[in-house]
Amino acid sequence: MADAFEPTNILVTGGCGFVGSNFVRWVAKNHPETHLTVIDKLTYAGDPKNIGDLPKSQVELVVGDICEADLLDRVVAGHDAIVHFAAESHNGNSILDPDPFVRTNVIGTYRLLQAARKYDVRYHHVSTDEVYGDLDFDEPRRFEPDDPYRPSSPYSSTKASSDLLVRAWARTYGVRATISNCSNNYGPYQHVEKFIPRQITNILCGLRPKLYGTGENVRDWIHVEDHSRAVWDILVRGRIGQTYLVGANGERANIDVMRAILRLMGQPEDGFDWVEDRPGHDRRYAIDPSKLESELGWKPDHTNFIEGLRQTIAWYEKNESWWRPAKAATEERYARQGR
Ligand code: NAD
Ligand code: DAU
């Protein structure tokens, strides 16, 4: 039987980023009785506009760094839950400079766990399927919660480290923690450095989309709103100390996603460039979400990927003022890497 929990005042870290802001908007809409405090450093990936239209009485923004223990001491007390999204999230950046990844993803999580422990606050940790490494293309199995950790990149190894801290703090200090490991999200407000927004905005800018390596790599796509709802379900009904995998049976090879974007945007299907592969590039991710489905009754709402992609393209077409400021610098960074 799942533990019942009704949060009234949640501290959301990284609530100005892609997934965190979706969670904040989702909770504000679906649970208007819940107050949310967002703590966000506003790195290149955080934009207060992502939650700017929500009522100030319901959502408060504290600009700050989760690595600062004094700040957490002031902010955490009085909340009944922490939902931790804040991270350096991009594999490509972690290869160029792992430093902020170790700092934010490992030290930041450690500081939050210490604060959750000190103030006895329920803690949910948002993580990634990449902690499990990768699968062969023809391997029948998918990732399961108790699989061994085998991260490949600086990003995924820092996320794996943070998960292990959570497991230890739950067992040793009794922190009331849960962990979710989710597959690749897509949807509105995703930074233009990531695969799907990069290709959409390249086409909108008259640039050619870029496909790494052979394009065979498989990602398991889930709409960001389905991820947000899963995080809520785990927060309120998940069993303390447990790990839940979040995925929507959305495995697709990158080349197929690329061709779908080109088709939906009226471009020829070969209208992209093959570019140098990412070092250490994971081959395939695949999530078995059956624990989340059977224990908590979660199911994805967005089951038609092509329709979700069509809506995501329409969002980027309509919201050029949101993504335009980051586009040139992002492409310059990629050009320097030959990608
Ligand atoms: P993102 O890069 O879009 O957003 C990260 C947010 O964290 C930004 O608002 C940034 O300003 C903030 N932040 C970074 N360092 C901080 C610090 N030191 N203190 C306070 N705030 C800080 O990332 P995202 O894609 O939204 O991912 C959010 C979380 O979800 C991450 O933990 C990531 O590992 C996890 N996740 C993401 C996906 C995905 O496909 N995007 C899939 C699975 C899990
Ligand atoms: O699996 C969950 C993870 O998904 C999250 O933990 C990460 O935060 C998130 O960034 C994402 O990681 P990926 O490395 O899979 O995402 P990215 O969007 O960078 O790349 C997706 C795939 O597309 C990957 O196989 C690399 C490829 N790619 C990426 C870019 C930016 C290209 O072929 N061309 C590109 O231009």
Image: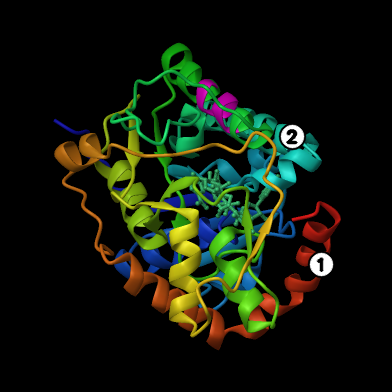
Sequence-earlier tag: 2 or 1? 2
Residue found 37% across the figure and 53% down from its top: 227
Is the CB atom of the residue marked by disc 2 within 8 angstroms of ligand 1's nearest atom? yes
Residue denoted by label 1:
329
Residue 263 position in % (x across, y down):
45, 78
Q: Residue furthest right?
A: 336
Do the CB atoms of the residues marked 2 and 1 lie less than 8 Å apart? no
* Relative depth, front residue between 108 and 11: 108
Side of 299 where 275 appears, left or right:
right
| Main secondary structure along the magenta-highlighted residues | helix
Residue type at the position of mark 1: Ala
Q: Determine the secondary structure under disc 2.
A: helix
Q: Determine the secondary structure under disc 1.
A: helix
**Magenta-drawn stretch contains 197:** no
Q: Quadrant of residue 47?
A: bottom right
Q: Which residues are magenta?
A: 159-164
For residue 328, above or below residue 221:
below
Residue denoted by label 2:
103
